[in-house]
Structure formats: structure tokens, C-alpha cells
């Protein structure tokens, strides 16, 4: 019994091929060449929005930088430079750089010096 291509798509698609081995059911590429789960650049307009936040952090103040359209490796590198510049800790979470403490003015001016478009957001 031969199934049509339409019937195969309804069942979930090709999972294994004798030529290429395991394949991704979404993009039908070999698992080694699959781009479905590859991290993409965060969505944004390229303007760094620097915001001071305390909500949901146990009263601790955190400065966040969002809106940058950089690849994850470049974002981590920028976060490291910001942490060094501010002399504090921080992290990158879901495309947003979080720096411990209230450093919004310092970060905003430093980003402008480095050639980024940056502006304060929030109160």
C-alpha cells in the first residue's frame, strides 16, 4: 500500500530515512542539519531600552537592557562588558541583560558611547 505525501504529512512526516538516518519531522532535514531548534536573534527594534526594576525580585533593584537585536553570543559578551563596567553581577535571560543594582544612567551613557541607540524606559 502506497501512501500519498498528503497522508504522510497528516501522520507527522518522515522520521527515519535509510539515506540520512533520523530526520526532523518539522523541517524534514537530517537531525544534524535541523534548524528548527536553533536560537534566533531576539526580536526588537535595535534600540536598547534601559529600565530599573524591583518588582518580583524581593525588593532588590535590577537594571535591565532589552530591545537589542544581537545574537546570543554577542549578547553574553555585551553583558560581560557591562558587568565589568558597573562592577557588579548580572545575567542574560531570554534576550534581556539583567545587571544587579541601579546603574541605568551609567549603562545608558556607556551604550551610547559604544555606538548603540539607547534610551531610558520606565520611571
Image (cartoon, helix red, strand yellow):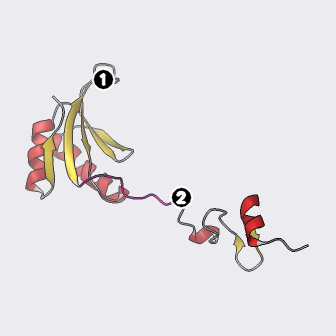
Q: Quadrant of residue 71?
A: bottom left
Quadrant location of the C terminus? top left
**Percent of width and height locating residue 97:** 29, 44
> Which residue occupies the foreground of this view, 7 or 14?
7
**Percent of width and height locating residue 67:** 26, 48
Q: Is residue 5 left or right of residue 49?
A: right
Secondary element at tag 2: loop
Secondary element at tag 1: loop
Q: Earlier in the sequence, mark 2 or mark 1?
A: 2
Q: Quadrant of residue 86?
A: top left
**Percent of width and height locating residue 73:** 35, 58
Residue at figure coordinates x 18%, y 32% from the top left: 122
Mark 2 lies on residue: 37
Would you say the residues marked 2 and 1 are in contact, meaning their CB atoms lie under 8 Å apart?
no
Residue found at the far right of this picture: 1
Q: Which mark is residue 105?
A: none
Residue 12 visible (yes or no): no
Q: Is residue 16 above or below residue 93?
A: below
**Is 42 a magenta residue?**
yes
Kindly report the secondary structure that dominates the magenta region of the rendered protein. Answer: loop
**Percent of width and height locating residue 31:** 63, 67
- Crowd band around label 2 with a 10 angstrom C-alpha radius: few (<14), some (14–19), many (20+): few
> Which residue occupies the foreground of this view, 58 or 83?
58
Residue 60 visible (yes or no): yes
> Which residue occupies the foreground of this view, 84 or 109?
109
Magenta stretch in the rendered image: 38-45
Mark 1 lies on residue: 55
Q: Is residue 41 above or below residue 21?
A: above
Amino acid at each position: 500500500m502506497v501512501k500519498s505525501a498528503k497522508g504522510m504529512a497528516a501522520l507527522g512526516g518522515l522520521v527515519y530515512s535509510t539515506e540520512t538516518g533520523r530526520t526532523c519531522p518539522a523541517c524534514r532535514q537530517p537531525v544534524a542539519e535541523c534548524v528548527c531548534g536553533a536560537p534566533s536573534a531576539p526580536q526588537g527594534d535595535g534600540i536598547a531600552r534601559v529600565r530599573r526594576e524591583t518588582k518580583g525580585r524581593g525588593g532588590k533593584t535590577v537594571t535591565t537592557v532589552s530591545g537589542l537585536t544581537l545574537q546570543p553570543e554577542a549578547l553574553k559578551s555585551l553583558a560581560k562588558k557591562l558587568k565589568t563596567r558597573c562592577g557588579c553581577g548580572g545575567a542574560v535571560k531570554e534576550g534581556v541583560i539583567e545587571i544587579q543594582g541601579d546603574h541605568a544612567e551609567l549603562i545608558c551613557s556607556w551604550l551610547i558611547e559604544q555606538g548603540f541607540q539607547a534610551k531610558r524606559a520606565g520611571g
